[in-house]
Amino acid sequence: MCGEPQEHEPAIEVEGLTKLYHRLLAVDHISFVTYRGEAFGFLGPNGAGKSTVVKILTGLVQPSEGTVRILGRPLGDREVRRRIGYLPELPTFHRWLTAEEFLRFHGSLYGLRGSLLRARMEEVLALVGLAGRERQRLGTFSKGMLQRIGLAQALLNRPELLIIDELSTGLDPVGQHDLRSLLLDLKRAGTSIFINSHQLPDVEALCDRVAIINLGRILKVGAPEELFDEPLLVELRAEPLSEALLQRLAQLALAVERDQYDPCRVLLRLRSEEQAAEVAAAVHACGSRLYRLAPHRRSLEQVFLRTIELSRSLQ
Ligand SMILES: Nc1ncnc2c1ncn2[C@@H]1O[C@H](COP(=O)(O)OP(=O)(O)OP(=O)(O)O)[C@@H](O)[C@H]1O
């Protein structure tokens, strides 16, 4: 794993965090820790409470209960704000400003000025692929360019912690790839990243750990590969996948999931690795041909959907 957390020093510490909007419990006593140098992803369906948590972390919303420490300091600490970069979910841009004027304004909020500000502006414009666009008005930027200038703004102060509330909206596949590479480079350089996203492939590629959140509660936290808590899941392709073979597989495996699109394919949850040999023997005993018998890894998207589905069925 690249970007190994730095000596397990925390970046964000959240304890019993709760947010009530009038009677609506948007965040329900959640606790988690992210570490320095780590990219931590927050995944959840619409309305899960993700943006509320980000707004609390960035001081835009007051928590109802609980404690938060960022880079070792309590919420609202002015010095710590200078060490954080924040890309909001739907940044509002002043359309009449040029890219340069926009960055100059945000730079001044970080206390940057003069030659240092000019150097940082040049640096971030190059990083996000907007070098040469300094004089262009934001009103004439495409959605992807606006996303990039938003990120440039968040990187102006060379933040130790970058908080991103939803990324990649409006970016074409090349833009998404470039942005993902940029975030990976920042992580490799030691930047801690907290990212809310619906873009599961981005989260899977970037994040060391993810939390799955729904209805204001954290359902699971772990490395993407740890969340695939089905180590003995195997994919079997055999032809024909007869009723007799399916019955034999149902006796052998803990669970058999048929593929609704491929009549020759099933996923089997085994009790032990040794059972793979029994599965192969059952295929031959039933007179079928074995085309594939291999470990199967669910995608983060499948894990996410199953976790949310399970939590809904338990309500
Ligand atoms: N200012 C507010 N006043 C009242 N309710 C709010 C406010 N902001 C958010 N909520 C409610 O809190 C809940 C969580 O919203 P939040 O925006 O945190 O979810 P989210 O996970 O970020 O969703 P999305 O993925 O759609 O952005 C929702 O039910 C939302 O309607």
Image: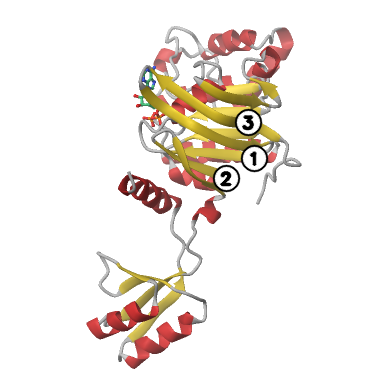
Picture quarter containing residue 13? Answer: top right
Q: Position of residue 135 (x, y in %)?
A: 52, 12
Tag 3: amino acid: Ile
Cβ at disc 2 under 8 Å from ligand 1: no
Taking depth in this image into account, of 172 and 80 the one nearest to the observer is 80
Find out whether the residues at labels 2 and 1 contact each other: C-beta distance under 8 Å: yes
Residue at the spot of label 1: 38
Tag 2: amino acid: Arg
* Label 3, residues with CA under 10 Å away: few <14, some 14-19, many ≥20: many
Taking depth in this image into account, of 200 and 188 the one nearest to the observer is 200
Q: Is 131 located above or below residue 274 in the figure? A: above
Say whether disc 1 or disc 3 marks the residue closer to the N-terminus.
3
Badge 3 marks a residue whose secondary structure is strand
Badge 1 marks a residue whose secondary structure is loop
- The numbered dot on residue 209 is 2
- The numbered dot on residue 12 is 3
